[in-house]
Image (cartoon, coloured by chain):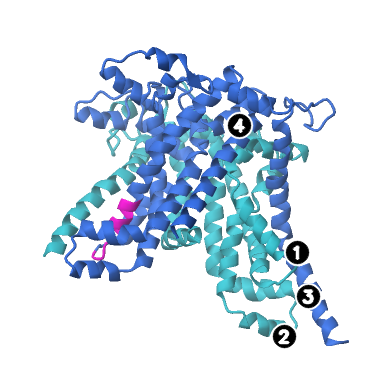
Amino acid sequence: MRRRRGAWWAYLVLAVLAIGYIAPFLIEVATSFKTDPEAASSPLSLIPATPTTAAYRTLFVNSQLPLWFANSVLVTVVVTLGRVLFQSLAGYALARIPFRGRAAIFAGLVAVMAVPNVVLLIPKFLVINTLHIYDSYAGMIIPLLADAAGVFIMKNFFESIPSSVEEQARIDGAGTFRLFWFVVLPMARPAVMTTVILSFQGSWNELNHFIVASQSPSLYTLTKGVAQLASGALSQGTQYPVKLAAAALMTLPLAVVFFVFQRRITNTTSGAVKE
Amino acid sequence: MTRGSGRRRIQLHHTRDGWLFVAPVLLILGLFLVLPVLMAAWVSVSDWHGNGSPFASGVGFVGLDNYRSILSGGGLAERDFGTSLRNNLYYVVLVVPLQTALALFLAVLVNQRALRARGFWRTAFYFPSVTSSVAITVLWLFLFSTTGAVNRLLSFVGIHGPNWFQDPDGLVHLLLGRLGVDSAPGALADHGAIGITWWDWLAGPSVAMTAFVAMAIFTTSGTFMLLFIAALRNIGEETDEAGLIDGANSWQRFRYLTLPQLRPTVFTVVTLGLIGTWQVFDQIYTGTQGGPAKTTLTPAYLSFSSAFNNQQWGQGAAIAFILFAIIVVLTLGQRWLLRERS
């Protein structure tokens, strides 16, 4: 009896909090279908009085949003593929290949993880500029291809699987790379999926690296383009429906991935950071 | 072939394969993480102004001049740096405790034994954490605009909300204003540190900054909630049940049985929070560019704008290194504290 009463108020508290977390996104979507005056006069309503797709038409016809979207997709796909390959190679080597210098590399990676990202803004620009890849896809993509945290996720996973399978394959005469590619990597699917999701999220949301790596409008990603929209690039007046439509569009692919892999994300994120 | 040389050959193979496997990651991290830090270290003690290579012969070594001009130069650079430290300090002091407490509260609620639709609640609280800071900032600019959702909600309880992102007034100054203290007492106005007076240090976060504080709590509490949930599961229910048998009520059980066991996780969350909150950049770049009246300027954004907008590359790099030092000290401090406890 007591526990049931406890549960009752717990649900009420949860519901109030959940509304606080969800309502902003519902307001975002609802407002993107409103007119400018209605967005200002009824900012809370979830059903537009005079629904319009004008904001979306503005974005697709009068802005570079389709280009930004394409750039974001390109960068995200290449970065994700590259990261997964490179960090599983490195993670495997650190977990399973007993080679000279392994301990030093491991220590180096731990140290590197502690360097905060925003501290690197100016320095990264200096190197990218010196290498003559400023303002190019190469400059936007290559520096993002390695992520020390992802190496640790893969390393931890490889350490957790039994080595008997590899030993059998090794006796059969497979070289290290063949062994890795055909035997080990297929077994690592759960960890690979985790790193795919984390890299996808990370590179889709990346902003500050692109700010220092490029300047041409033709290389804008969604984050950079929408950030500029926010400061009023397209508009007279506030144009909240247009801005919120852009925010909703850039959130959509993430939301899809999030809901498809929901269980894995909410379970692995904690596993990944826990250590 | 003897056994020994065969083993040595395998060892050589291992070494070759190992280095080949880690080569891509090492190369990229070396080029875009280690090398940049070294280059920036040079720029921070040089008079390079963005033209040509920082290693060209015309670029001079100026020692600690850049650091001196932002820490004690007496000019605009010093005042801006002091202002950005003050802004970020209030941000940290508000965000870290609030997000930690809220994350723990959410985790305890979601982790209850008899709860239904656990996955739904967890998803609802975590979703803001996966979305981009640009999209959330755009949303926030609308929610906290003069005619936005927040002010509409406030109007229901009879409060006339401010124009959040345009309002540079500090909360402490506003509070003192209510009490009739409108201008600085002489001692506070005449002295100060890093270019701003004690009176300005005590201004509190501006109204605009509090909107960013709310945003940080909204977007990070979900992530930290997951950490607390994982920790709560590791604790298990035995001690809780023991407490139940001894007749402790649910608050006593939480306070004296659960919370002490969560201590390591609390430390982790606080550290991650401290590291993250000193790096505010994306939101400021997207939302306010440091305004109104520089009250949302942060060291991370100032470092960027000094270099890229004002061509003060040496000062920008110096600010980045001071920020780096702050974050390293916080991280080491936390490690040290944790070791003391365990």
User: Do tag 1 and tag 3 residues touch (Cβ < 8 Å)?
Assistant: no
Colour of the chain lettered A: cyan
Any magenta on residue B110? yes
Closer-to-camera residue (B119/B89): B89
As shown in the figure, which amino acid type bears the numbered disc 1? Trp
Residue that badge 2 annotates: A171
Name the mark nearer the viewer: 1 or 3: 3
Q: Which chain is blue?
A: B
The alpha-carbon separation of the residues under discs 4 and 2 comes to 56 Å
Output the chain of dot 2. A
Residue that badge 3 annotates: B11
Q: Quadrant of residue B40?
A: top right
Q: Residue furthest bottom?
A: B2
- Magenta stretch: give its range: B104-114
Q: Secondary structure at mark 1?
A: helix
Whether residue A67 is visible here, answered yes or no, is no
Query: Within 10 Å of the Cα at label 3, are there few (<14), some (14-19), or many (20+) other Cα atoms?
Result: some
Residue that badge 1 annotates: B19
Dot 4 or dot 1, earlier in sequence: 1
Any magenta on residue B39? no
Name the mark nearer the viewer: 1 or 2: 1
The alpha-carbon separation of the residues under discs 4 and 1 comes to 36 Å
Mark 1 vs mark 2: tell me if same chain.
no
As shown in the figure, which amino acid type bears the numbered disc 4? Ile
The alpha-carbon separation of the residues under discs 1 and 2 comes to 22 Å
As shown in the figure, which amino acid type bears the numbered disc 2? Ile
Q: Where residue B1 sits in the image (x, y, percent)?
A: 88, 87
Magenta region, main secondary structure: helix
